[in-house]
Structures are given as structure tokens and as C-alpha cells.
Image: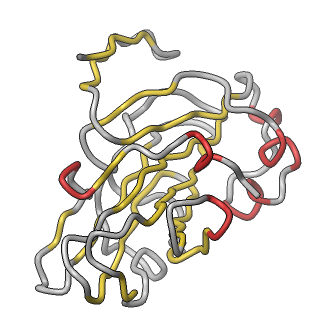
């Protein structure tokens, strides 16, 4: 199935349902309604930590958000990542404007740890090598186990997007991460604490 939507830009889009969810925390159209533009501003903001997501939940075919969907919001992309084999994995993130990539030691949101945060401002769409911080350290993962993966991004105005990629133990890469390695999480995975 597909979801047809008409977002703030007035552009109709069609998103094919897959295994990834993206609840969007939406504020009004005034820039000062969501204070700040960095990941730190988001994570320390009481409203972000306590509010339920507002706006649309959409499903995408890879670990990549829809592009240019609005202004003055915080978005999340959340999925379970299922490594195909045991070994060391490297993750990447790309966004406009501020973002961070988090990975849990299991399938819950309670054990999320930040693994990447770009040091530069906005990166071009799905460009994973523009600045320091876009790439994680190598992380040892067990093949077939579910790990919660979350990208958090903030946008004030202009373009917006976020996506994450991964390089596998055999040096093959999926950038952005293909739905072949993703599974829709349970609702408990969206808890922030």
C-alpha cells in the first residue's frame, strides 16, 4: 500500500509503505517556536522530551526521510536494524540542518547511545563524507539480532532531510540503509527515556 500526503509545501507526495517509521514533532511556522537549530538544542528541550509526536507518521523504503516537508520542526527516523552477519559495522548520517544517529544495544529505546553527529551544518542530500562526525566508530554487532536505530534531526527553514547508511563487515555498503536490513519497531521503541 501507499500513503498519499499533502504536506505544508502543498506538494502531494506518495510514499510506499516499508519497514521504517518517521514520526515528526511539528511546531508552528514561527522560527522562534522551536528554540535552536542543533542536536543539543533538541535533546535538552523539555517540549521534545515530553511531547507526543504531532504531524504525520510516514513509511519509507530506506532509512531516509522524505525531503523538504516543512520548516521549524524536529523529526525522527526510527527502525530496527538487523545485521546480516556478526562483525564490525560502520554507520553514517547525512542531514540538513542538525542531527544525530543513535544505536541501542537491543531493540528498546532505553539503551540508545549517540554514535554519530556531523560537526558541520547542513550536508547535501545523502552525502555521507562531507565532515567529521558523520561516520561512527566500528561497532561489533551480532548477526540476526535486532538493534534500535534512530536519527533525530532539526530544521528551521529551507531544505530538510536525514538519512543513514551502513558499511558491513565484508566492506559492502548500503547508503542509505536498505529495507532489507530494517524492520518496523514496536511502539515501545519510541520512548525517549
Residue 71 position, x and y percent, is 59, 31
Residue visible at 60% across and 22% down in the picture: 55
Residue visible at 67% across and 32% down in the picture: 53
Residue visible at 27% across and 69% down in the picture: 144
Residue 169 position, x and y percent, is 19, 86
Residue 131 position, x and y percent, is 42, 77
User: In the depicted view, which residue is nearer to us: 36 or 180?
Assistant: 180
Could you tell whether 40 is left or right of 162 in the image?
right
Applied colour scheme: secondary structure
Eyeballing the image, is 133 above or below 177?
below
User: In the depicted view, which residue is nearer to us: 193 or 163?
Assistant: 193
Quadrant, the N terminus? top left
Q: Residue furthest front?
A: 144
Residue 64 position, x and y percent, is 34, 47
Residue visible at 80% across and 36% down in the picture: 51
Eyeballing the image, is 27 above or below 174?
above
Could you tell whether 177 is left or right of 72 in the image?
left
Quadrant, the C terminus? bottom right
* Image quadrant in which you'd find residue 50: top right
Number of marks in the rendered image: 0
* Image quadrant in which you'd find residue 95: bottom left
Could you tell whether 124 is left or right of 78 in the image?
left
User: In the depicted view, which residue is nearer to us: 109 or 166?
Assistant: 109
Amino acid at each position: 500500500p501507499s500513503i498519499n500526503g499533502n504536506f505544508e509545501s502543498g506538494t502531494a507526495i506518495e510514499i510506499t509503505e516499508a519497514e521504517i517509521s518517521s514520526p515528526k514533532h511539528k511546531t508552528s511556522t514561527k522560527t522562534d517556536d522551536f528554540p535552536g537549530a542543533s542536536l543539543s538544542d533538541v535533546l535538552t528541550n523539555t517540549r521534545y522530551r515530553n511531547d507526543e509526536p504531532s504531524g504525520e507518521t510516514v513509511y519509507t523504503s530506506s532509512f531516509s526521510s522524505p525531503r523538504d516537508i516543512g520548516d521549524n520542526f524536529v523529526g525522527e527516523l526510527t527502525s530496527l536494524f538487523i545485521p546480516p552477519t556478526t562483525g564490525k559495522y560502520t554507520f553514517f548520517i547525512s542531514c540538513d540542518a542538525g542531527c544525530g544517529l543513535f544505536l541501542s544495544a537491543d531493540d528498546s529505546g532505553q539503551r540508545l547511545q549517540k554514535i554519530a553527529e556531523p560537526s558541520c551544518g547542513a550536508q547535501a542530500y545523502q552525502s555521507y563524507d562531507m565532515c567529521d562526525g558523520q561516520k561512527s566508530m566500528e561497532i561489533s554487532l551480532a548477526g540476526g539480532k535486532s538493534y534500535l536505530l534512530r536519527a533525530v534531526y532539526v530544521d528551521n527553514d529551507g531544505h530538510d532531510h536525514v538519512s543513514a547508511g551502513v558499511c558491513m563487515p565484508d566492506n559492502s555498503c548500503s547508503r542509505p540503509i536498505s529495507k532489507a536490513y530494517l524492520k518496523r519497531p514496536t511502539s515501545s521503541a519510541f520512548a525517549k527515556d
